[in-house]
Amino acid sequence: MAQKTVLIVYAHQSPGSFNAAVRDVAVQELTELGYRVHVSDLYAVDFRANATRDDIIGDLKNSELFQYGEETMHAWMEGRLGDDIVAEQRKVEEAELVIFQFPLYWFSVPAIMKGWMDRVLTQGFAFSLKRMYNNGIFKDKKAMLSFTTGAAQTMFQPDGINGDINVSLWPLQNGTLHFCGFQVLAPQIFWSPSHCPAAARAAMLDGWRARLRGLLAEKPLTFAPCELFDLSFQGGFQLRPEVKEERRSRPFGITTGHHLGKPLPPDNQTRAQPSEENTPGCRK
């Protein structure tokens, strides 16, 4: 049996950070379990965040109006993407699981990691309009977010000042990872480690270590499958009328994003939903 591979896309400037400790635990535990682990340390290699014409080798298809997505799609098809992008794409191709390890910056990933997503997950390589979401290119791979917050967990609850963490996670987990087809595992959230005593941080790492042992066997998060939508420009890529009618009597929306004017399904973006009611079928 071929050795399974995990890719950790890591973004923190300091080797003494809690994020670095979380990364090291993952590398150690997964290696001991027999996985081959690659780490893309974005700050260490000075990964370029901005997506520009420099990512494309050779002539543009349309030199009068530069469109990054179109040009990089053609460049990918023709083997003309920059070496740093190609190197990361090869790591993604090899990996059964991709872990994004980062501190939460402005309710999202740091700019250098956003640049990785912008530049590496090119059209054609990672998605197309015919191959997206549960029919996506990476549907046989898993991915997850693992991150630290500056704010306490209570601040990210529905009645907390920052709002529901499920809403904050929807763009990254659905709009980026699931859009590319990844089966998205529940996020690993380390709440405010910089404001915790050492014993609490140690307990967080122990919990992460324990989770890693069964990580690839976990059930992914629930998202609305493409089959619920009219996937045509005439139909507007919207939920089919019979689906909306069938959901009318349900107490919750389908997902955090597809709430249909109903209450959000509880913790739809933070843990797998066992109940069929909820399925469709700060900075450190």
Image: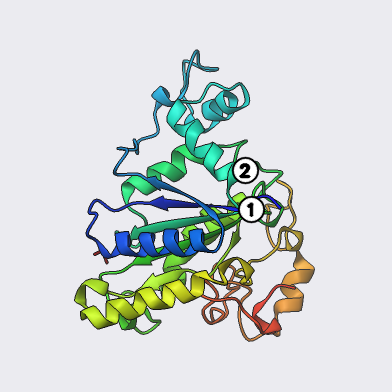
Q: Is residue 5 above or below residue 82?
A: below
* Front residue of 247 and 271: 271
* Front residue of 172 and 140: 140
Secondary element under disc 2, as helix, strand or loop, is loop
Q: Are marks 1 and 2 in contact (CB under 8 Å)?
A: yes
Residue drawn where x is 49% and y is 14% of the image: 58
Residue drawn where x is 22% and y is 54% of the image: 14
Q: Would you say residue 37 is visible in this rendering?
A: yes
Residue for badge 1: 181
Q: Amino acid at mark 1?
A: Gly
The first of marks 1 and 2 along the sequence is: 2
Residue drawn where x is 60% and y is 73% of the image: 260
Q: Is residue 51 above or below residue 251?
A: above
Dividing the picture into quadrants, the one containing residue 119 is top left
Give the position of the C terminus as an image quadrant. bottom left
Tally of marks:
2
Secondary element under disc 1, as helix, strand or loop, is loop
CA gap, disc 1 and disc 2: 8 Å
Residue for badge 2: 127
Apparent side of residue 18 relative to residue 69 in the rendered image (left or right): left
